[in-house]
Amino acid sequence: MRWLWPFSVAADALSQRGTGLRPGAPPAEDLTLPLLLWVKENCDPILVDDQALFVQEISAGIKGMINGSRHLHRRFARTGWLLGSVSLENMDPVLRKFASTGWLPPTGIMAWDGMCRKVLLQTRNFYYAWHRLLEVAGGQNFQLYVEAALDAANSLTSYFLAKDASEPTYLQEQQLAMLLRSAIAMNSGIPSNPCTCQLFYQALLRQSVNFWKACFKPEHLRQGPSGDVRHDGALDNLVQEASPCTIIKEHSWDMFVPPLEALLLPEEDQLTGNFACLPKRIVTLMVCGQYWLHRGDTKMAKRHFHGASQMLVMSMDCFDTSMQSYIDGQGNTHLLNLQELFAYLGRLDQDASPFAGWEEKKRRWTGSREVFSSKWPPQEGKQRTLMMPLLQNAAVMPPLCFDTNGTLHLRLSGYGDRRLQLFDWTGTWSLMPVRPLAGLMQKTETKAVLIYVDNPAWGTLGHCIHHLTAVTFATLGSALLRGGVPEMLKLRATMQLYLYFPRRGLRDAGFEVGHFRSSRSVMLPWLSLLSPRPPLLMSDEQPLINRSALPPPLQVADLRTCHGGGVWISRTGKLSREELDAFVQVAGSFPGWSGRSKKELLQLVWGQGRQGDDCLLEQTGCLRVLIVRRGAMARGKRTVVNLPEALSWISAHYSADEVRVAAVEMEQFTIGEEIALAQLADVFIGSYGSAMWWPIFMAEGSCVMWLTPHVKFWYHKGRPMDLSAPVWSNTGALEYQGLRKLRHVHVGGGLPPQGTPGEFQLSEEEEPWT
């Protein structure tokens, strides 16, 4: 059995034969909720007549719960990447009865008092959520799903409200977060992950974090002014009509704050719809909750804090990951993790506390408020974030085969006909059916690389590159670092790419029978980086694929092949420097990918002439400026009306040996040539959008100019920018942000003369304010 491995291990495994063994197992104590161990060491029940027998039975019960806890968490650690592999039958009967009824032999939790009872109640909260989720984790009972998921979410909220900010985050909590997300994905038909903040939303998330830095104070727990002049002044400024708090309250509450049922059974795409980017919404609601506290409106404050707690528990496995780049130890950014936010919510004034909202929502066995405001014994010196150590988007798999229906068969044992699925943990939520391997068919020595492809990554440059950074790092990154280009090419020769489209993606891309539409794929040319073989299209609806609609070299997978091993790769939720560096190195050094040499590109794009040759070929102090002119794929948007006049002005003010400027449509070049053009440019100019991903290939220290539309508000790093003059920054506006050492300058657009055809101004609804 394979584990979910980090990228580097996945890449190493791809270069070796056989299935291998997982790296060392966690120590046994890491596979038991530490609260149970604390109860065993520190708690004695209330005395009864037959004390010896009673204590003996209690001790046996606690020991049985500890063993059951270790068994459950060990099994999930081994097979958690394979959904449905852990079910309610894997929960020990003693632990199951404790979770569902609070029973311990020969009595229940009430046999203890004080801190011991509180810790056991808290432990029961935790395992009750496990119990309810395991009831529906296999996706067999949809009617039970909604009630179970609501119960689990309520239990988790109570559990985290009781935790102190000084407490570590346990491995079991991370596993439970993954189980919650997978149970929702398997039962709801949810189209995408509401935690994924991409492209435009990533910029908005950055703005919200700066909004948080300026306006949130962790000591502000009660209604009325906090007494901090700076903080109270910042909240006073939010009274204006254009502030997020006013807009949310008066215009967009239902759009901004989805009810829990809408997150469990969404009716819209959460990647681009109203419920996208939950971390941004959580942060904004927390600040606005303090705003209403400041104004003395505890009812409105409670509403905001309750909405934040709902979304926080639904994004507990990604919130910390999304926020990690903002936790810099300055101001109050250290609070941007799940456990500290829940600790803040647990300390709030009773009248503004979100706890009552959860209790009113679903009254069960949750107990009194006093129980959940208590703190269990602290353990210092550990990380408190919910960063998933196994959340790496690459599951290395044992020998595998496909059948004609597109189902993946793995060499597994002990699962019978159980429903199993692979899950894309951090990108758009894909589910891929899996069956235990029943027999062998045609064998091949190639390694299967299964890549989940969503429609944005298939057709939009920014999504495509963002997606492929993870894939490239997981497949070729380690080989490139270990042995350079020769080792990378050797590994590349063993790979066969399978592009997995769920049915919705199949239709959106125009590949489903009866839904053909001609559309150009941005991703397809990039796939030659990863394998010399034509990529193969597969889907969980394999018979619905329209073969005649596939652009070459894409082919329909002949699903009668067995591979010695493989890797399932999903898109990363956030770029890392290692991923981006590997992608840039692979793409920039790939041999034979460009039709022209760099010298030919220089002469073709920047022109030739005796006076400017030194400028072009030797870089003698002159600047090479590349302007991206939006082509047909922009559909008339993001174009610069006065580009010819700007080029004429440059020619009139600078000689050819000082500045060479070229305006190009990137679609006219091969991908290799496009990368080379970016590498050759000293200054890159383009409209805000996906084309601004090309600067990641520029030499560090180069300059990037972002042309923005004419808008009333334009924010960068959470602050309004006055674009009447250029604004300089070390951070880009897209996901790579500061991962490449570039200088960025933002230039605001103006309005053209009256009568110029086209749309040149965004409406207030379209502007990036909320």
Image: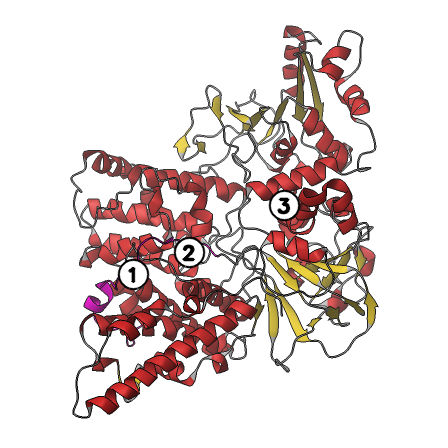
For numbered disc 1, what is the local secondary structure? loop
How many labels sit on residues? 3
Q: In this view, does 197 lie above or below 397?
A: above
State yes or no: residue 589 in magenta: no
Question: Nearer the N terminus, badge 2 or badge 1?
Answer: 1
On residue 475, which mark appears?
A: none
Mark toward the start of the polypeptide (3 vs 1): 1
Q: Is residue 370 magenta?
A: yes
Task: Tell me, for residue 163, which label it has, or none.
Answer: 1
List the residue tagged with mark 3.
469
Magenta segment, which residues? 362-388
Q: Residues within 10 Å of mark 1 (few under 14, many from 20)?
A: many
Q: Is residue 119 visible?
A: yes
Q: Label 3 is placed on what type of residue?
A: Thr
Label 3 close to label 1 by CB (< 8 Å): no
Residue 305 figure quarter: bottom left
Tell whether label 2 touches label 3 (CB within 8 Å): no
The quadrant of the image that shows the C terminus is: top left
Q: What residue type is labelled 2?
A: Leu
Q: How crowded is mark 2: few (under 14 residues within 10 Å), some or many (20 or more)?
A: many
Relative placement, left or right, of 648 versus 161 is right
CA separation in Å, label 2 and label 1: 13 Å
Closer to the N terminus: mark 3 or mark 2? 2
- Residue 168: image x %, image y %? 35, 57
The percent position of residue 644, horizontal first and vertical second, equals 67, 18
Q: Who's the residue at 27% across and 53% down the image? A: 344
Can you identify the residue that label 2 sits on? 386
- Residue 742 coordinates in the image, percent (x, y): 56, 27
